Amino acid sequence: MRRTIPILAVTALALMGLSTALADPISAGRPDRGFQVRVGAFMPDGGGDFWDDNEDVFTLNAGDFDDFNLGVTYLYGWSNHLEFGVNLDFFDATVLSEYQAFTDGAGFPIFHDTRLATVPLTADVRFIPGGRFSNRGRGQFETRPMLFVGAGAGINFWEYEEFGDFIDFDDPAQPIVFGVFADRGTAFETHVLAGFEFPISPRVNILGEGRYTWSDDTLNDDFAGLGKIELGGASASVGVSVRF
């Protein structure tokens, strides 16, 4: 159901903009392509049995992974009100945590690091209610401040690692050992987004965008049998958009 929301939104946006795209094509001389660079933060939601179990055992929660996010987008304008976007985003965060209920023989905490990295490659449809350009006549155009909303889907390349000191509960002596546990995969992703662009020249805009992502995958490798890992969350970014 959660993934159905963006898919229905993409369909609605495409149908909403179809008549506009036919009636209001990009005029000659107006830039119909764009490139965005975005920087901001991604805030994983966590949730699910795997995150919950980790939070019960370690001083760790999904909110600890809120960290820097970098994204780039290529845009193609079907019309003054409808665009198609291709996005590539990068997120990588490492968090230090310790056992909540256990210490070493000297009473010191037992630490390990946890790393989460995601690289979603996605596409979306964006609707611009007020249009990107105003027509000044005689083939002249003027870039205007604009709001946009959109939705899309794609694939999410992810990695999850835990490395450091752990208690070996399979050994009756419960020794502390160094370990590295890792898994990686490719998950389906859906998202919705909204934002604005404000022109600072005819072809350069400043950008603000918010996005919400749904994505999860079944754990394997060193975490096989521990269920699904939730990879979705919210992001907020600012950046620059160049039209050509």
Image (cartoon, helix red, strand yellow):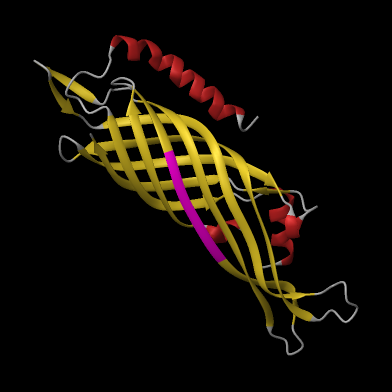
Q: Is residue 96 left or right of residue 80?
A: right
Residue at left offset 31%, top offset 47%: 239
Q: Is residue 17 above or below residue 175?
A: above
Count the numbered circles shown: 0
Residue at left offset 45%, top offset 31%: 124
Q: Find residue 59 and report its horizontal and vertical position in percent.
A: 66, 68
Q: Main secondary structure of the magenta part?
A: strand
Residue at far left of view: 138
Q: Quadrant of residue 147?
A: top left
Q: Find residue 73 and report its horizontal and vertical position in percent.
A: 38, 40
Residue at left offset 52%, top offset 36%: 191
Of 71 and 67, nearer the camera is 71
The residue stretch that appears in magenta: 87-94
Residue at far bottom of view: 106
**Viewport quadrant of the N terminus:** top right
**Viewport quadrant of the C terminus:** top left
Q: Is residue 149 left or right of residue 137?
A: right
Q: Find residue 102 and report its horizontal and vertical position in percent.
A: 76, 77
